[in-house]
Amino acid sequence: MRTINLLQRMNIYQEVFLSILYRVLPIQKYIEPVYFYIYTLFGLQAMYVTALYITSWLLSGTWLSGLLAAFWYVTNRIDTTRVEFTIPLRENWALPFFAIQIAAITYFLRPNLQPLSQRLTLLAIFISTFLFSLTWQFNQFMMLMQALVLFILDSLDMLPAVKVTWLYGIQLTGLFLVCILQFFNSMILGSLLISFNLSVLIARKLQKNLKTGSFLNRLGKLLLHLFVVLCLTLFLNNIIKKILNLKSDEHIFKFLKAKFGFGATRDFDANLYLCEEAFGLLPFNTFERLSDTLLFYAYIFVLSITVIAALAVAFRNLSDSTNQQSMYKMGEYRIGLKPETAYNLIHTILFGFLALSTMRMKYLWTSHMCVFASFGLCSPEIWELLLKLIHLYNPKRICIMRYSVPILILLYLCYKFWPGMMDELSELREFYDPDTVELMNWINSKTPRKAVFAGSMQLLAGVKLCTGRTLTNHPHYEDNSLRERTKAVYQIYAKRAPEEVHALLRSFGTDYVILEDSICYERRHRRGCRLRDLLDIANGHMMDGPGKNDPDLKLAGHPRFCEEIKRNLPPYTAYFTRVFQNKTFHVYKLSRNK
């Protein structure tokens, strides 16, 4: 009963472009569309690794660093990418452009760039930012983290203010352009990124003498600046959301509020995220795998040294407003931190916190971890600082360390992981899910083309893809009315009367409903996180099985619908007729005369 503009709601411009490219190029006789799609995405991953290689090379000044970053990315592929087992994910389209953007920013932040080089680099940053934003619905949250990196470094006088302003402007311009292409998607206009960037630029104009004065004076100004930016951001964001009547992203803030301990919630949408492993904390075994390739040890080593240098430089900058270079004198040694190094340091720290708090976001951190660790091991500045601190400084020793350590690690990685990678490449795997195939074939052959299907979001996406039938709901969750509709459809797994479930489903024009045993009798999640438990809690009902319930939860007046309907009792057969069944799925046709 609703038509959705796919280009507005889903980030599929890349598929549209690829389909046009496939039809225009004279390749249709030689390659099937699905392989053209897969090879394009795999080619993008090659661009991704190349961008990591270049970033590491730019930071360290040697190609050996880039080679080590690429090797680490490949040997840690379980934790650096999901492309090998879930090819068409939006992040697999977006992250290569994000890596290119980081490489371009790293080059842009170098001092004394020629005007032409600076303009071309800004163009590269803009194009990669735009493409990243266009291909992933979570773009605004990732770029908000990036904006925070710029804000921190600008406040500590570790980046040139003019270049930071350019980067803020590029973020805003790229996002507004995506907003236009997505038919003025209100979720983009109401994003925190737009409010934050505008607030920072306004606050800068209000506080012109932010970077002058004594240490305590500057610290006080910084705290005031932070407070002004925070208040302006919240004010602008609330105003924009009220004007646009925007509720599309409220489930994200409910999820974050509950996740970080600001009160438990019974909100169905927030709990659906909280109970998914991908949105939980980063598992400890991730660090075991990263340590097995020596990546984690190298990363902590480099991170420790650069954090010490950054703290020293930040203190120096705040203490001496006349200092224009990120240098700090400690005893007889001068500690320096290049702007591009400072940017990548804060970037890896903030995205590290994001990954630790939300496992799904680890792929943004682990790939950059490869870059940062390899840069540090090949950086003359890092080895110089370390050797001076332990009183073993010698120019020859720096040269020996920055080349010998990476080469030894590369030899270790080749020895330990190369045979396994070759074995993996020789494996041939095949999709095998006969129950789902049987269901799709039945829908194609036994149901009208205009039939409307209800069920779980993930399954209905497959129904749409394989059969083209009309759906009641789908997995794109960034829409308030769709979330409400999904919760209503999911009452098929709650303790509701058959007439209530029938009325809800018919209100969406449903002809057939698909019940899945894997959801009705779910055991994958613990008690309190099973879908049926989330529905019971949201409906104010006690959960099944042994364990505690909140005191205000009540016994349901009806048995669980998905279980009781299979008994074919008269109250259920009056509204629902079973038309298909296998080991996994049960399909019921809804009566229309009730």
Image (spheres, rainbow, N blue to C red):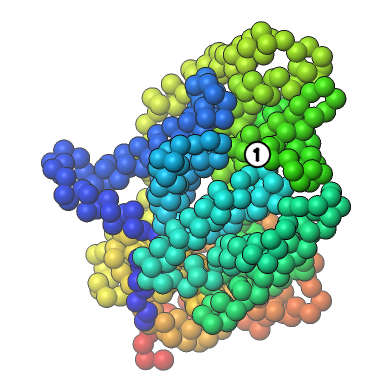
Q: Residue at x 76, y 52 (%)?
A: 212
Q: Is residue 469 above or below residue 43?
A: below
Query: What element does badge 1 sit on?
Result: helix
Q: How many residues crowd around disc 1 within 10 Å: few (fewer than 14), some, or many (20 or more)?
A: many
Residue 35: give x, y in percent of width and height: 27, 41
Nearer the observer, 177 or 521 = 177
Nearer the observer, 367 or 50 = 50
Quadrant where the image shows the N terminus: bottom left
Q: Residue at x 30, y 45 (%)?
A: 37
- Residue 396 can be seen in this image: yes
Q: Residue at x 65, y 53 (%)?
A: 151
Q: Residue at x 74, y 80 (%)?
A: 554
Q: Is residue 239 above or below residue 106?
A: below
Residue 435: give x, y in percent of width and height: 39, 54
Residue 82: give x, y in percent of width and height: 49, 42
Callout 1 amino acid: Ala
| Residue at far front of view | 322
| Residue at far bottom of view | 594
Picture quadrant of residue 370: top right
- Residue 359 can be seen in this image: no
Q: Is residue 389 above or below residue 533?
A: above
Which residue corresponds to mark 1? 342
Tag count = 1
Picture quadrant of residue 143: bottom right
